[in-house]
């Protein structure tokens, strides 16, 4: 970033939307170009929420909607470039690739820059929304389709699709390969020789695309709970991680003493839930509650809240028992969903239907390891396919990653219930200079909360070679199970 660049007073997030309109008008004559760019990269006022204590500049980046037809249908993507917190940048910039698919780095910018403050002393942070996400893609958010408990309403999703297509959006524009081209073009536009990458969850697939298309532009890569190209999202049993945690509790004297009936409670709870009375107007019947409760436990683990699981199971079992004993109405626990609220739903389905559901097409329902989830996605994807001619079509071999010699650190959690933790082994051979560390008792996003993961990330991104890194902090397997206030009574 050029020193001494003037920082104007910033406005709030809708400035991106205003900039989008102005950009369309200005492009009819002569497009604005950033002073350090050779492609349209238009400076705009930053969101007010980004300016407090930050040195940041913002842009609208122009890319083609279809990289196979670059002359037609332009698309605008928001970009934020945060200066180092120290006196200058001595380390390569850090590009952040979000997960989902469907997460927006721009909408999450405040938490991202705060969580990564420990990495920002000597380097810039660069955020750009993946196409189809964030404030410039509101037509794809479909927030009305997300109901109670973050259950997706298929009818409203299709309504959203029809409306978006009537406004000129095409689902076929929102694919991983096109996102890769966007980020590659951004590096050239910003005249960055090399940047480091943090790729979380689904962002790992975008990073693998950059390895294939732009390896020379990568300094090093840190994968956080990665969903690699070869990894199948729905083809495993995440609930087995809850079983693993129960075993850990059973081996811990204090936990076993506090929750002596934990194993039995976990086994019988789904059956007991089917017999409870629910309040009038409850959206889902008692027969559906075991499924939602299992999702809650999975979410607790992936949200790095493993220590609270035994207390949650025991307290829930007690509340169900009391309701059955007194023949009274039972209230399900507040949901802990794996947050779809921040996900752009149409973009999510454009990619998920092509990359996840399609490769399970030959499996019968009897062979599926997540039959309810896959069944829902299959139904939704079939409806989307009937309503549009613009679904994503993938080339043969799309799930085969390229090899890289770039220094690579892979971090994930032992109790991740979103992405199968040991699936990393299938992709690891592609990275010849890599270290893989699985954090004990960690969930999905270990980098945001786990001190060991953050210590490893700091050393790695500062230049430590993967094979020389001291990973002793990951050997501490201590997990303190604590009683909740309710259980302590």
Image (cartoon, grey):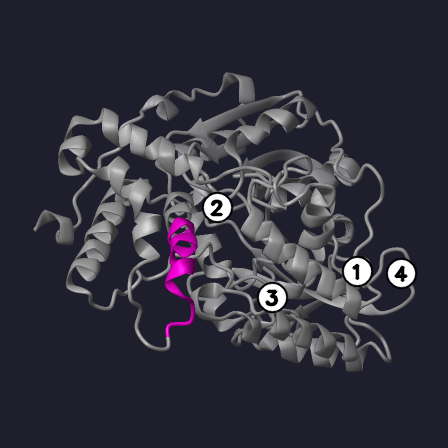
Name the N-terminal-most of marks 4 and 2: 4
The label nearer to you, 1 versus 3, is 1
Q: Residue furthest top?
A: 468
SS type, badge 3: loop
SS type, badge 4: loop
Q: Position of residue 307 (x, y in %)?
A: 27, 40
The label nearer to you, 2 versus 1, is 1
SS type, badge 1: loop
Q: Mark 1 highlights which residue?
A: 391
Q: Mark 2 highlights which residue?
A: 120
Seen at 43% across and 59% down, the residue is: 288
Name the N-terminal-most of marks 3 and 2: 2
Relative depth, front residue between 302 and 373: 373
Seen at 66% across and 21% down, the residue is: 429
Q: Are marks 3 and 4 in contact (CB under 8 Å)?
A: no
Mark 1 neighbour class, 10 Å CA radius: few under 14, some 14 to 19, many 20 or more: many
The CA span between labels 2 and 1 is 39 Å
Q: Position of residue 85 (x, y in %)?
A: 46, 50
Q: Which residues are magenta?
A: 282-295
Q: Mark 3 highlights which residue?
A: 134
Q: Position of residue 179 (x, y in %)?
A: 73, 53
The CA span between labels 1 and 4 is 19 Å
> In the image, is residue 164 part of the stretch drawn in magenta?
no
SS type, badge 2: loop
Q: Which mark is residue 70?
A: 4
The CA span between labels 3 and 2 is 23 Å
Q: Which mark is residue 425?
A: none
Mark 4 neighbour class, 10 Å CA radius: few under 14, some 14 to 19, many 20 or more: few
């Amino acid at each position: 970033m050029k020193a001494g660049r003037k920082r104007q007073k910033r406005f709030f997030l809708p400035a991106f939307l205003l900039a989008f309109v102005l950009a369309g008008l200005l492009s009819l004559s002569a497009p604005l170009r950033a002073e350090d760019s050779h492609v349209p990269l238009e400076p705009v006022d930053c969101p007010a929420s980004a300016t407090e204590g930050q040195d940041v500049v913002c842009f609208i980046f122009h890319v083609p909607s279809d990289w196979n037809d670059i002359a037609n249908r332009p698309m605008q993507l928001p970009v934020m470039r945060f200066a180092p917190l120290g006196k200058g940048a001595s380390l390569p910039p850090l590009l952040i690739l979000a997960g989902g698919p469907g997460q927006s780095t721009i909408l999450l910018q405040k938490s991202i820059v705060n969580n990564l403050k420990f990495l920002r002393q000597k380097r810039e942070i660069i955020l750009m929304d993946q196409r189809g996400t964030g404030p410039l893609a509101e037509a794809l958010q479909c927030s009305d389709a997300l109901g109670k408990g973050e259950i997706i309403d298929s009818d409203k999703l299709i309504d959203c699709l029809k409306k978006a297509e009537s406004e000129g959006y095409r689902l076929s524009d929102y694919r991983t390969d096109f996102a890769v081209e966007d980020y590659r073009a951004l590096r050239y536009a910003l005249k960055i020789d090399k940047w480091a990458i943090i790729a979380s969850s689904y962002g790992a697939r975008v990073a693998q695309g950059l390895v294939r298309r732009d390896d020379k532009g990568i300094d090093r890569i840190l994968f956080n709970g990665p969903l690699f190209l070869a990894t199948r999202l729905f083809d495993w049993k995440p609930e087995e991680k809850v079983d693993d945690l129960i075993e850990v509790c059973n081996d811990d004297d204090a936990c076993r003493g506090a929750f002596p009936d934990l194993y039995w409670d976990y086994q019988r709870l789904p059956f007991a839930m089917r017999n409870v009375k629910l309040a009038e107007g409850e959206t889902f019947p008692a027969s559906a509650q075991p499924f939602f409760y299992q999702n809650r436990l999975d979410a607790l683990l992936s949200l790095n809240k493993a220590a609270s699981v035994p207390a949650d199971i025991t307290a829930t079992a007690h509340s169900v028992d009391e309701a059955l004993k007194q023949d009274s109405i039972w209230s399900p626990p507040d949901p802990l969903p794996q947050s779809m609220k921040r996900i752009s739903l149409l973009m999510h389905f454009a990619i998920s239907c092509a990359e996840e559901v399609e490769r399970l097409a030959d499996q019968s329902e009897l062979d599926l390891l997540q039959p309810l989830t896959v069944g829902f996605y299959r139904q939704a994807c079939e409806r989307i396919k009937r309503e549009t001619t613009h679904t994503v079509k993938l080339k043969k071999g799309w799930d085969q990653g390229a090899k890289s010699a770039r220094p690579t650190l892979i971090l994930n959690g032992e109790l991740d219930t979103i992405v199968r933790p040991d699936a990393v082994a299938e992709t690891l051979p592609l990275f010849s200079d890599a270290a893989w560390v699985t954090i004990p008792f960690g969930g999905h996003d270990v980098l945001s909360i786990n001190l060991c993961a953050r210590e490893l990330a700091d050393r790695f991104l500062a230049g430590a070679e993967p094979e020389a890194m001291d990973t002793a902090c990951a050997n501490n397997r201590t997990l303190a199970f604590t009683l909740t206030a309710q259980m302590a009574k």
